[in-house]
Amino acid sequence: MTIGKSGPPVSHISQAYPDRVEVRGHDLTADLMGTLSFTEYFHLLLTGNKPTDDQRYFLDLLLVAIAEHGMMPTNVAARMTLAADPGSLQGAVAAGILGCGPVILGTAEDCARLLEEAHAAGGEAAKDAARAIHDSGGRLPGFGHPVHRPLDPRAERILELADQRGVSGPHVALARSFRDAAAEAWGRPLTMNVSMPIAAVMLDLGFPSSAVKAVPILARTAGLLAHLAEEQQQPIGFLMAGRAEEAIEYERQPE
């Protein structure tokens, strides 16, 4: 018995044969290896098409922008996992990725949905959406940051380069509209964090909204591997675990 809805039993991504590997209709060794950069190959794998120059440029830019942000909980979890099991690099990476929720990884996927809905609605959609989220006590995706105030330098650089290269379209314009709408709804400026420009630029470049979250996940995987390479050479995972234990007091629960 099949549980859930299923599509046709077909994949369009890849097939291995005795003499070759075919990926998205291309011969891996003859057509792709030595020809595509990894960023271009990622685009091909993700979308089925080779990127345009602008898609490649900004995919590269966004991966660089979001790959690393210091000793985040995801990196700490990965380092402590590797300290506990030094032979499980893949397990340590998985531990870090499993912690990549919207608080740490960002809300690019939510931003993409918000921008698409606002674009479809037209008019004063940004203002109306920001006011509705504020009045319901919610958080506006893509806004607010515990460190970067009043501006997130990564977000500003993405927008700057999008303008310079002429790829800023309706979704980038909407992102800027949401900045103004947020300030009006909350009665003060809110930091536009890196998630909103990631979503806006990707949508303006023709990426589907379903692909937006793939960028921070791939980028943070690279950051995790860097932390784990350092952990192998300069272990601090158990130091982190010890400091955590020191920071938390045990208190017997009253009966």
Image (spheres, grey):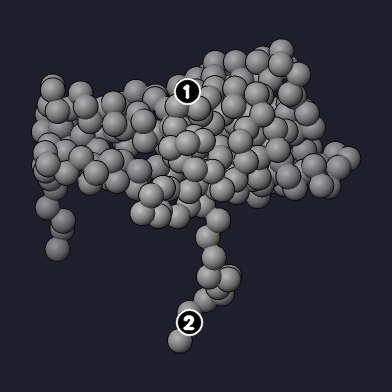
Residue at the far right in the pictured view: 123
Q: From the viewer's perspective, is residue 50 above or below residue 133?
A: above
Classify 10 Å Cα crowding around label 1: few (below 14), some (14-19), many (20 and above): some
Quadrant position of the C terminus in the picture: bottom left
**Image quadrant of residue 208?**
top right
- Residue at 25% x, 34% y: name it: 76
Residue 186 relative to residue 218: left or right: right
Circle 2 — which element?
A: loop
Q: From the viewer's perspective, is residue 240 above or below residue 49?
A: above
- Residue at 12% x, 41% y: name it: 87
- Residue at 64% x, 45% y: name it: 209
Task: Between residue 252 and residue 97, name the one nearer to us.
Answer: 97
Q: Amino acid at mark 2?
A: Thr
Q: Which mark is residue 186?
A: none
**Image quadrant of residue 116?**
top right
Q: Amino acid at mark 1?
A: Val
Give the labeled residue for mark 1.
64
Residue at the far front in the pictured view: 19
Residue 202 relative to residue 61: left or right: right
Is residue 106 in view? no
Q: Name which of mark 1 and mark 2 comes first in the sequence.
A: 2
